[in-house]
């Protein structure tokens, strides 16, 4: 099933402009184009966007996300998620300390 950039924007909560940017930098590239050159996203493209959004939520820069997603091994992704989790736990501790003060 292929969906348009507008539909993907609506269901993902990401702006069309952001999706265009992700396409331009090669982060989330639509698998198809219409004869009028409109972007069409496959299920795999939507999954990739979902992964991008998870890593963005963790505060990871886009260029680092691209490297992680393009790496063939899931072990590297798991290690990266563990490191980001540790960083988030540390950040939470700092925020808790500030709130307590």
Image (cartoon, grey):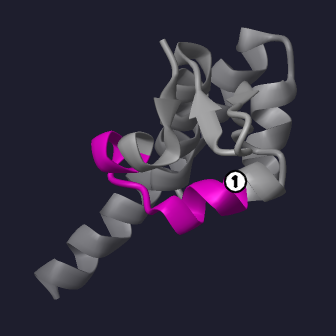
Q: Specify whether 83 is left or right of 15.
A: right
Q: Secondary structure at mark 1?
A: helix
Residue 28: image quadrant is top right
Q: Position of residue 14 (x, y in %)?
A: 42, 56
Front residue of 87/42: it is: 42
Residue shown at the point (56%, 67%) measured from the top left: 17
Residue range of the region highlighted in magenta in the rendering: 9-22
Image: 10 above or below 100: above
Q: Specify whether 80 is left or right of 98.
A: right
Residue shown at the point (81%, 57%) measured from the top left: 24
Q: Report crowding for label 1: few under 14, some 14 to 19, many 20 or more residues within 10 A (C-alpha).
A: some
Q: Position of residue 101 (x, y in %)?
A: 16, 88
Front residue of 31/56: it is: 31
Q: Is residue 97 visible?
A: yes
Residue at the left extreme of this rendering: 100
Front residue of 25/63: it is: 25
Residue shown at the point (60%, 32%) measured from the top left: 40
Q: Specify whether 63 is left or right of 74.
A: right
Residue 61: image quadrant is bottom right
Front residue of 98/80: it is: 80
Number of numbered labels in the structure image? 1
Residue at the front extreme of this rendering: 35
Q: Main secondary structure of the magenta part?
A: helix
Image: 40 above or below 58: above
Q: Is residue 60 visible?
A: no
The residue indicated by pointer 1 is 22
Image: 70 above or below 37: above
Q: Position of residue 37 (x, y in %)?
A: 74, 45
Is residue 55 magenta-colored?
Answer: no
Q: Specify whether 56 is left or right of 96.
A: right
Residue shown at the point (74%, 12%) measured from the top left: 75
């Amino acid at each position: 099933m292929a969906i348009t950039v507008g539909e993907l924007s609506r269901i993902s909560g990401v702006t069309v402009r952001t999706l265009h940017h992700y396409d331009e930098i090669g982060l989330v590239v639509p698998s198809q184009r219409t004869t009028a050159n409109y972007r069409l996203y496959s299920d795999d493209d939507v999954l990739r966007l979902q992964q991008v959004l998870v890593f963005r939520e963790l505060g990871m820069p886009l260029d680092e996300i691209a490297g992680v997603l393009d790496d063939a091994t899931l072990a590297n992704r798991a290690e990266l998620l563990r490191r980001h989790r540790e960083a988030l736990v540390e950040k939470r501790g700092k925020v808790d300390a500030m709130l307590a003060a």
